[in-house]
Image (tube, helix red, strand yellow):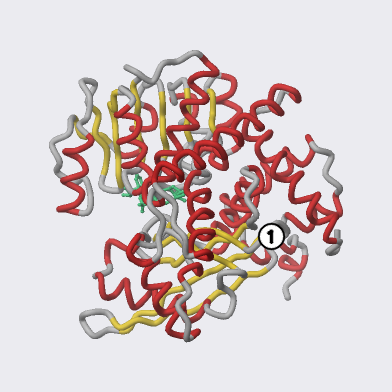
Amino acid sequence: MTKELRSLPESDLLFGESPALQRVIAIFDAAARVVDLDENIAVRLRRPDKVVIASLPIRHDNGAVKVYTGFRVQHSHALGPYKGGIRYHPDVDLGEVCALAMLMTWKCATMNLPLGGGKGGVRVDPLQLSTSEKEQLTRRYTAEMGPVIGPEKDIPAPDMGTDEYTMAWIMDTYSQRSGQFTPEVVTGKPVDTGGSVLRREATGRGVVYTIEEAAREIGLSLKGATVSIHGFGNVGTHAAHTIAQRGAKIIAIADVSGGYVNTRGIDVDTALSHLTRHRTLESCALGDRIAADDVLTVPCDILIPAATGHVITEKNAAKVRCKILGEGANGPTMPEADTILERNGVFTVPDIVCNAGGVIVSYFEWVQGGMNFFWTEDEIDSRLQGLLRAGFQRALALAKERKVTLRTAALANGIQRVERAMRLRGMYG
Ligand code: NAD
């Protein structure tokens, strides 16, 4: 080992200087200070429990074999089995997956779920894969991760670039290999293969439920409010649909192909039907064409980042002009940007609260799969609202009491739950 490498902290040796990981550790440290977290516990929680890296060879439709890299990171199982999505994206790296696994620990904990935090990813551009290539990749990923996932061990779910069909392939591959039907190994499956009603819509709908709580707090009516949405996949489309139903006007949207702005309002159904036919929003007559990232700085009442992480940075934060920032995406705001937004009076609903609807209904799907007894849409929606709104209010109460941001308060609530479980279990606490 070279001298330079020896002088690096161990986390840097493993993950490099990942901005995603640095951001999560920075916000963890800020919240840990609020609850006076014992450094002996903090030192453990800055690292994941386990990391698996696998080479995933697949034969492309043109006959060539290409090898992709897949990751699964298990951060903490103090509160229950690891839980977290699998992301297919060309920028996926170990540091980012690790950061997202840590976020899942705090998200499950702050929402009072009996689950720990994990995350998976494959470094690939899913738009460049045919359906059969994507299926092969998913089955190979499942085969490689088979020993570490399972209904009582680690339960994956969809994230960027993966969807309910991906989850059906994982469930099928895992069930074939274990010799028994195991729907609870993943959540976010199609309803016909043991999925839960409302899981598909849950994250986007939950984003709007938490924005409603924030709007009530600052006295903003959603009726007539203007909305910009960055990212128009699972989370962005369902958030758009739900917020439009409440009378809000969507004035800007973007996906990977670019953005549109239209102050008269963008019709969500037109955008959705274009997406179904063309996979992206390219060449859709929705309004004036702008760069995708410019959607983040269009003046509006409510901004919903629902694509990749760290899109709001020190560079563009001062130009973000919204009253509420609802973080549909994981980690869209860098810590330096957070300070600028706070100074400018933006009410930020942090990712671990704002997009927690997905893991809440995933938890319901896991419970229903284990019982083979399925709830109605109304039951799920009312339980989702109950957990999500209560989690928001617990964070808001601590934020007011300790005069900290909602992000720090939500993390602090989650950290305290994990700390209590670690002490009671007595595992190296
Ligand atoms: P998705 O793959 O369904 O959609 C992603 C969207 O982002 C697509 O419209 C894509 O075109 C767009 N996009 C990608 N790169 C972009 C870029 N550079 N600029 C603008 N747009 C870009 O993914 P999703 O499931 O909707 O997840 C979106 C975000 O929400 C991610 O950060 C994910 O971690 C988070 N999230 C998802 C869930 C869930 O249940 N799906 C739950 C919690 C959090």
Crowdedness of circle 1 by 10 Å Cα count: few (<14), some, many (20+)?
many
Looking at this view, name the residue that lies furthest to the front. Answer: 373
**Residue name at image x 49 percent, y 59 percent:** 368
Give whichever of 332, 398 is nearer the camera: 398
In the rendered image, the vertical position of residue 139 relative to residue 21, given as above or below: below
Would residue 219 be found to the left or right of residue 28 on screen?
left
Quarter residue 66 falls in:
bottom left
Instruction: Give x and y (percent) for residue 291.
Output: 29, 37
User: Which of the image's four quarters has the C terminus?
Assistant: bottom right
Q: In percent of the image, x 35 and y 60: which residue is there?
A: 191
The residue lying furthest to the top in this view is 219
Vertical order, 1 against 396 (above or below): below
Per the image, the residue denoted by label 1 is 76
Image coords of residue 88 (percent x, y): 40, 62
Q: Secondary structure at mark 1?
A: strand
Left or right of 155 on screen, residue 223: left
Q: Which residue lies at the image location 69% right of the left edge and 60% below the top edge?
A: 76
Residue 53: x %, y % from top left: 55, 74
Q: Is 277 situated left or right of 26 in this image?
A: left
Q: Nearer the viewer, residue 117 or 40?
A: 117
Along the line of sight, the residue nearer the viewer: 314 or 396: 396
Pick the front one: 244 or 20: 244
Query: What's under tag 1, amino acid-wise?
Result: Ser
Residue 19 falls left or right of residue 130: right
Question: The N terminus appears in which quarter of the rendering?
Answer: bottom right
Ligand 1 within 8 A of label 1's CB?
no
